Amino acid sequence: MDRVTPILETRGLEKRFGDRFALNGANMSVPAGQIVGLLGPNASGKTTLLKTVAGLLQPTAGEVRYPANAEPGPQARATIGFCPDSMAFPRWMRVRDAFTFFEEMYPDYSKQRAGELMRILDLQDVLHTRIRALSKGMRERLVLGLTFSRETKLYLLDEPLDGIDPVGKTKVIDAILALKPEDASILISTHMVKDIERIFDSVHFLSKGRIVFSGGCDEMREERGQTVEQAYLEVFSCE
C-alpha cells in the first residue's frame, strides 16, 4: 500500500478483560481522506478496537496516535465521530430531540449538514416520531445521521449494516459516500464484506485481536486478482 499520511495509528494496542485479550498487539493505520474497512468475524475485537480509539475504553498497553487536534482517552470523543452498533435513547426522545441534543453537546455540530442528512437519510418525515417507535433500519439511519452531523476529520462506524434489509443496506452505503467530507477519514468495522467492499480504499483484517492483513483495495484487485471478499475468505477460512 502506498504510504499516505495517517490520520490515525495504533501501535501494539492491547486490551485485556481479566485474563482474556480482546486486542493483542493491534497495529493499524488509517490514511487521511480514505474510507478504511476493519474486517473480521464476530468476536475478533473490532468493537473493542473502535471503542478504545474513541476513548470509551482505556487500553491495557500500546498507544493510539490521534488526529493532530485530538487528545488521548475520553477527550478523544470531542474530535472523533463515533457511530456505535447501537445507541441508547431516553424513551421520551423524538428524532428531532436527538439532533438538538447533539447540537448542544458538540461544538462541531453543523445545522447545515444535519438538514442535508435528514433529507438524504429520509428522516424528515419522522422528525416528530419517538425513536423507540422506529424500525431498526431507521434507527441505524438516525445514528448515522447524528454521527455525520458533526464536522470532524475522523469517523468510526461500528457495524453500520448489521440487521438492515438489503434495500436499507444500499441506502446506508450510498449515504456514507454522500456524507463523507472530502478530507475526512472513515473507519468502518463489519463482517459483511460483500455488501460494502466497493466503497473501501484500504482494509485491515482483524483476527483474535491482531491485525493479520492490511492492504489497498485497488492493489489487491490489480496485483493479486482478488476482490476484498475473496481475500477475506482466504485469510479466515482456516480459522
Image (cartoon, grey):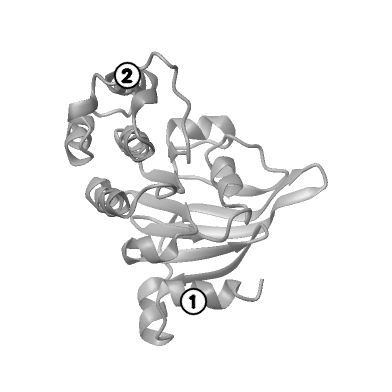
- Look at discs 1 and 2 and give the one toward the viewer: 2
For the question of whether residue 107 can be seen, the reply is no
Question: In terms of secondary structure, where does tag 1 sit?
Answer: helix
What crowding class fits label 1: few (fewer than 14 Cα within 10 Å), some (14-19), or many (20 or more)?
Answer: some
Quadrant housing the N terminus: bottom left
Question: In terms of secondary structure, where does tag 2 sit?
Answer: loop
Q: Quadrant of residue 224?
A: bottom left
In this rendering, the answer to whether 237 lies above or below 33 is below
In this rendering, the answer to whether 100 lies above or below 189 is above
What's the mark number on residue 231? Answer: 1
Q: How many numbered markers are drawn? A: 2
Q: Residue furthest top?
A: 92
Expressed as whole percent of the image width and height from the top left, the position of residue 150 reads 32, 33
For the question of whether residue 215 can be seen, the reply is yes
- Residue at image position (50%, 35%) is 76
In this rendering, the answer to whether 41 lies above or below 171 is below
Quadrant housing the C terminus: bottom right
Expressed as whole percent of the image width and height from the top left, the position of residue 27 reads 60, 60
- Residue at image position (46%, 31%) is 87
Q: Amino acid at mark 1?
A: Ala
Residue closest to the eye, 74 or 197: 197
Is 103 on the left or on the right of 27, as rendered?
left
Sequence order check, earlier mark of 1 and 2: 2
- Residue at image position (51%, 72%) is 232
Residue closest to the eye, 127 or 115: 127
Expressed as whole percent of the image width and height from the top left, the position of residue 78 reads 45, 30
Expressed as whole percent of the image width and height from the top left, the position of residue 172 reads 30, 48
Q: CA distance from mark 1 to mark 2?
A: 42 Å
What's the mark number on residue 94? Answer: 2
